[in-house]
């Protein structure tokens, strides 16, 4: 299956009131696990790399090549998007040059006018190559590769202005955070989400999807959320399964120390997590394979 950009997939989800899962990859096992789940469920998937994960794995060109080669090697037939998650201006340009199908330019930490101008530039560069663009307004709480957000609510007028740049979908802060949610977290601000959905009339993205109560995510999907970002939930599942394997002493039985065996429980746990989340966000099975963009 040729790789595609995310624009039409996410627009279809927005129109149909369902959601596309966007899962971060951290290595080859992560990539295989996510793709296996998507193929089994016959659903499109967005595979993301953060700036830090891309650096860890060897750079954007390496990540693009690894994911594309894995899609081919596994015989994947569902639509797959390779997306840059929370990229700064330089990272977005590098990912575009490396052949990513979709990029997020995260300029929330800049002055709004600077965010706006750089978003326009990224849209121009990306769309010239058939690459979809996500932008951000209003900080997402927590930390993502050194970019710290307090989780403030997105300004509706700024969201409208940013949406007018020609971006394909918009990440907007509605009280969500990256990482694990604290016990005193107050939940999503649905009143602000409604205002944003009414104002921009385009697909919205919910970052920090790991740990948000299922009923809140499902409600948000009915109010315009069309892309859900997941990373921490898969990391926790991988760590738990790997720990159980080692604590059970299986790495000391026969050739249980072989990394292909040691990493399998964690890899399978990622696939299981993918399938579980996909089941309740309503990601639609593929009926017609879209043409590559």
Image (spheres, rainbow, N blue to C red):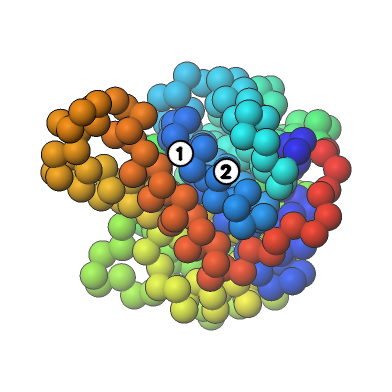
- Mark 1, Cα crowd under 10 Å, few <14 / some 14-19 / many 20+, is many
For mark 1, give the secondary structure.
helix
Looking at the picture, does residue 147 appear above or below residue 69? below
Task: Name the foreground residue: 257 vs 79.
Answer: 257
Q: Which mark is residue 138?
A: none
Task: Name the foreground residue: 202 vs 6.
Answer: 6
**Residue 172 lies in quadrant:** bottom right
What distance separates the C-alpha of mark 1 from that of mark 2? 9 Å
Task: Name the foreground residue: 251 vs 125.
Answer: 251
User: Going 75% across and 50% down the picture, which residue do you hit?
Assistant: 7
- Can residue 23 be seen? yes
Q: Farthest residue in the front direction?
A: 254
Q: Earlier in the sequence, mark 1 or mark 2?
A: 1
Count the numbered circles shown. 2
Q: Percent x, y for residue 28?
A: 47, 30
- Mark 2, Cα crowd under 10 Å, few <14 / some 14-19 / many 20+, is many
Looking at the picture, does residue 86 appear above or below residue 62? below
Q: Percent x, y for residue 83?
A: 61, 40
Q: Percent x, y for residue 215?
A: 46, 78
Q: Percent x, y for residue 254?
A: 21, 28
Q: Farthest residue in the right direction?
A: 291
Looking at the picture, does residue 265 appear above or below residue 63? below
**Residue 66 lies in quadrant:** top right
User: Going 67% across and 55% down the picture, which residue do you hit?
Assistant: 42
For mark 2, give the secondary structure.
helix
Residue that numbered label 2 is attached to: 35
Question: Which quarter shows the C terminus?
Answer: top right
Question: Which quarter shows the N terminus?
Answer: top right
User: Going 49% across and 63% down the picture, which residue do you hit?
Assistant: 277
Residue that numbered label 1 is attached to: 30
Q: Is residue 57 left or right of residue 186?
A: right
- Can residue 86 be seen? no
């Amino acid at each position: 299956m040729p790789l595609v950009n995310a624009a039409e997939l996410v627009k279809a989800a927005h129109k149909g009131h369902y959601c596309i899962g966007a899962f971060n990859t951290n290595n080859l096992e992560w990539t295989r696990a996510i793709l296996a789940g998507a193929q089994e469920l016959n659903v499109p998937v967005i595979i993301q790399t953060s700036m830090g994960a891309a650096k860890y794995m060897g750079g954007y060109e390496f990540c693009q090549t690894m994911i594309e080669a894995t899609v081919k090697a596994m015989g994947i037939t569902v639509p797959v998007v390779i997306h840059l998650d929370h990229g700064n201006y330089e990272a977005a340009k590098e990912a575009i040059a490396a052949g990513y199908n979709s990029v997020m330019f995260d300029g929330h930490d800049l002055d709004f006018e600077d965010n706006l101008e750089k978003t326009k530039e990224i849209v121009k560069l990306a769309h010239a190559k058939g690459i979809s663009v996500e932008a951000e307004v209003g900080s997402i709480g927590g930390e993502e590769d050194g970019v710290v957000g307090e989780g403030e609510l997105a300004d509706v007028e700024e969201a409208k202005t940013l949406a007018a740049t020609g971006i394909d979908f918009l990440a907007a802060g509605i009280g969500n955070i990256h990482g694990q949610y604290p016990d005193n977290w107050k939940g999503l601000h649905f009143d602000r989400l409604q205002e944003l959905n009414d104002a921009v009339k385009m697909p919205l993205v919910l970052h920090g999807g790991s740990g948000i109560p299922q009923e809140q995510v499902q409600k948000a999907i009915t109010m315009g959320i069309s892309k859900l970002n997941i990373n921490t939930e898969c990391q926790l599942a991988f760590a738990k399964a790997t720990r159980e394997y080692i604590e059970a002493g299986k790495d000391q039985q026969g050739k249980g120390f072989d990394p292909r065996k040691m990493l399998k429980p964690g890899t399978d746990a990622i696939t299981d997590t993918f399938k579980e989340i996909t089941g309740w966000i309503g990601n639609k099975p593929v009926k017609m394979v879209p043409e590559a963009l």
